[in-house]
Image (tube, rainbow, N blue to C red):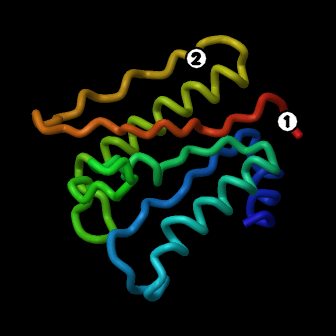
Amino acid sequence: FETLVTEVSIIFEIVIAATPVPQLEAGGYWGDNLSVLNEIIPNIIKQVCLDFGIPIVAVNEIFYTENVNGTMILNESLFFDNVHPNDKGYTLIAEKFYDEVSIILEKISGSPTALPSPAPSKQPSSYIESSSSADTLIPTSNP
């Protein structure tokens, strides 16, 4: 991942990374170890981005919710199947990117950036807001 970040940073003026969407069940490429995709890889991505001063959108965090015991669990209502988000999940991803990219561009330019408003979403009354309290990592200066 470090090599990829280095090579992409040479080509593009602005680079923004994102963590992967977590999975509900193990299987496929990652085998029986969900912690690789849901915990280890996002943490590696966050650390490399922090080390290289690359802004990151923590997409994985919007899929977690706090249960009655205070434990963070995956919100199954945001998935179409055990791997892919449903319309609500993709809407949350789009909103998270819009919000975070707006902040990143404002930090880079030093003034508010006028981005077009996102299209109004067709949200059912049971729409679930993200309760993630984690901040997106945004560098204060280039390394």
| Numbered badge on residue 11 | none
- Earlier sequence position, callout 2 versus callout 1: 2
- The x and y percentages for residue 121 are 23, 33
Look at label 2 and name its amino acid. Answer: Thr
Q: In the rendered view, tell whether residue 110 sits above or below residue 45.
A: above
What residue is rendered at 72% in x and 55% in y? 47
- The x and y percentages for residue 53 are 78, 43
Label 1 element class: loop
Locate the N terminus by quadrant. Answer: bottom right
Look at label 1 and name its amino acid. Answer: Asn
* Residue carrying label 2: 113
Q: In the rendered view, tell whether residue 30 sits above or below residue 88.
A: below
| Numbered badge on residue 142 | 1
Question: Image quarter for residue 132?
Answer: top left
Count of numbered circles in the view: 2
Q: In the rendered view, tell whether residue 143 sits above or below residue 110.
A: below
Q: Which residue is the extreme one toward the front?
A: 69
Q: Nearer the viewer, mark 2 or mark 1?
A: 1
| Residue 58 relative to residue 51: left or right | left
Locate the C terminus by quadrant. Answer: top right
Q: How much space separates mark 2 and mark 1, taking CA atoms? A: 19 Å
Residue contact at pointers 2 and 1, CB within 8 angstroms: no
Q: Residues within 10 Å of mark 1 (few under 14, many from 20)?
A: few
Q: Which residue is the extreme one toward the top?
A: 111
Q: Nearer the viewer, residue 32 or 52?
A: 32
What residue is rendered at 24% in x and 39% in y? 128
Label 2 element class: loop
Q: Which residue is the extreme one toward the left?
A: 125
Q: Residues within 10 Å of mark 2 (few under 14, many from 20)?
A: some
- The x and y percentages for residue 27 are 38, 85
What residue is rendered at 76% in x and 40% in y? 13
What residue is rendered at 39% in x and 45% in y? 93
